[in-house]
Structure formats: C-alpha cells, structure tokens
Amino acid sequence: MRIGLFGGSFDPPHEGHALVSRLALTRLRLDRLWWLVTPGNPLKDTQRLASLEARIAAARKTARDPRIVVTGLEAEIGARYTADTLRFLHRRCPGVQFVWIMGADNLLQFHRWRRWEEIMRTTPIAVIDRPGATLKAASAMAALRFPGARVKEREAPLLATATPPALIYLHGPRSPSSSTALRRKAGR
C-alpha cells in the first residue's frame, strides 16, 4: 500500500488542496492520500482556527475523491509535530510506503519544523509547485542540506519505494487559492 500524507490546518480547505491531492495520487501512483487535519500548527497563530470538527467536515466536502481520506489522526494520537505522527505511522503500519506531501511554499520554511531532518531521513517527500515558490524552492535549506536526495520528476512513480532522504518536485496545474486569503476575505 502506498499512502500520501498531506498535513495542514485546512482552515479552510479549498480547491488547491484537492488539486495537489489529485496530482500526487496520479503522478506518485498512490493508493490513498490522507489529509491529516492538524489540531494546531506550532508555527502559526492557532487561536483563530475554526474547530477541528468543522475543518474536518469542510475538508470532506472539498476532497470529493474516494481515494482521499480526511482524518483527525494527529488529535487522536496526541501528536503535536509531524515527526511524531510519522514515527507513529511507521511503527503502526510497517508494510505501508508513506510519502509526505507538501507545497513548495512549505518547503521554504521546512527547516523550522521540529526534527525536520528526521522527517527527511525517514519519509520520502513530494514537493508540489505553488504560485510564487517555483524558483525559490530549490534554494530551500532542506534542499541544500540534502542535495543528493533529489529524485528526478520523471521518476515520480518510484518515490514511494525510494530510500530516504528522497525529495521530488512535482509540477502541474497550480491553483492560486490560499487558506490565508480565504480567511482574510471572510474577515478572520
């Protein structure tokens, strides 16, 4: 089983999340993709987040693909950091090949994540191109710290079985949608 893990606050979820998911499912040949709706983000102001239940319900309406599973797993297992979630999943699901999915904008600040190097060493990562981050992503600290981790885009179907560190950049249709912009528009 090959499962993509797409974490975030999903506040609110939008078509860009669904677009990234479809791209990852197709290009990486994943069996499933899990949206890990986080209870909070240590790098963001989470006091203004909608409730976890509301974000999960909205994410389920947005996902609209039977291969996408929307979950509040991190709240269920008490994980605050991605590294803890991945450690739990690798231990509990030893036969599953996991791939972490992130937008190129997140790669730019990935080095600020708790135990980011552990994440790189344990789980292949697919970085999906995002408007405004295309040219900057290659100079992200994670890309510079692990220069030999780069997998060629044409080898995307092999990423799930690659030995970490493994990092691929995927290009395709991009959405200008942004949860931050949607919150601003809604006055939050």
Image (spheres, grey):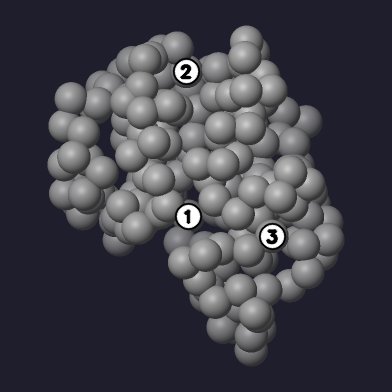
Mark 1–mark 2 distance (CA, rounded to whole Å): 25 Å
Q: Position of residue 66 (x, y in %)?
A: 78, 31
Pick whichever, 6 or 132, lies toward us: 6
Which residue is located at x 18 percent, y 25 percent? 148
Q: Nearer the viewer, mark 1 or mark 2?
A: 2
Q: Which mark is residue 160?
A: 2
Q: Toward which corner of the image does residue 54 lie, by quadrant? A: bottom right
Q: Position of residue 140 (x, y in %)?
A: 22, 50
Split into 4 quadrants, where in the image is the N terminus? top right
Sequence-wise first label, 1 or 2: 2
| Badge 2 amino acid | Ala
State the residue position of label 1. Answer: 175
* Depicted 77 relative to depicted 89: above or below: below
Helix, strand or loop under label 1: loop
Q: Which mark is residue 98?
A: none
Q: Nearer the viewer, mark 3 or mark 2?
A: 3
Mark 3–mark 1 distance (CA, rounded to whole Å): 25 Å
State the residue position of label 3. Answer: 39
Helix, strand or loop under label 3: loop
Could you classify mark 2 by the number of other residues whose Cα lies within 10 Å: few (under 14), some (14-19), or many (20 or more)?
Answer: many
Which residue is located at x 42 percent, y 52 percent? 114
